[in-house]
Amino acid sequence: MLLPAGVLAGGLLGGAHGLTATPEYTATSYVVAVAAEGADPASALGFAQAYGRIATQLAVLGNAQARARVPVATLERSVRTSTSPDAPMIAVAATSTRPARAVAMADAVSLALTEHADAEAADTRVRLRPFARATRPAAPSSASPVLTALVGASAGGLLAGLALLVRPRRAPAPPGGHPAAGTATGPAVPGPAPAPAGRAAATAPDATARP
């Protein structure tokens, strides 16, 4: 019964967490890297990868906090960026419990990143341009109660299975139940081995011998 009980308990806990947790929303904005006239077009892809890495650094987030109206710590915790290996594009995703705040954070970081790139354009010969602004998310991006219940049931079943594997095993009982009274339960002591037949005949006294 341990395995079904673990699955049931895990499913109930996971479902309860999904019902009580505050839903989160994710908004994503996009910027694209453009090489200056006469520059190598392939350089735009390389700088897009580089700017995607620094988008969540303090130099960029410090300029974005005023537009987003949230502390830098919130931006560091809520904003993530991703880039494509084939296109010079950067996706800036922000997550919040309020859809409007998620949109504001994504757009603020994107704008701060383009300003940072423009300030260095004289040396890099690459600029960032807004490609698509963030839109208000229509549905939460966090896991649904059904999904959390399934995850909890899987985790509970796994833990119960591990508990079954590591629990101590009982020694098998003898066929007659408890050992009989007076019966030794320790290991049997082997008796003396019988002497070979030829040796026994040679050492036995001669019954027909006279004194």
Image (tube, rainbow, N blue to C red):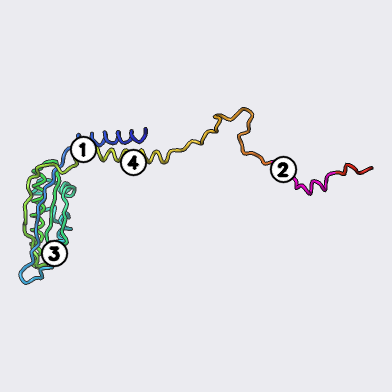
Q: Earlier in the sequence, mark 2 or mark 1?
A: 1
Q: Where does the magenta region start and end?
A: 191-204
Separation of disc 2 and disc 3 at Cα? 90 Å
Residue positioned 43% across, 38% down in the render: 167
Foreground mark, 2 or 1, reads 2
Q: SS for tag 2?
A: loop
* Callout 4 amino acid: Leu
Q: Earlier in the sequence, mark 3 or mark 4?
A: 3
Find disc 1 in the rendering and name its residue. 146
Nearest-to-viewer mark from 3 and 1: 1
Residue farthest toward the front in the current orientation of the protein: 208
Residue 160 in view in this figure? yes
83 relative to 168 in the view: left or right: left
Viewer-side label of 4, 2: 2
Report if residue 194 lies within the magenta region. yes
Report if residue 123 is visible in the image: no
Residues at discs 1 and 4 in contact (Cβ within 8 Å) = no
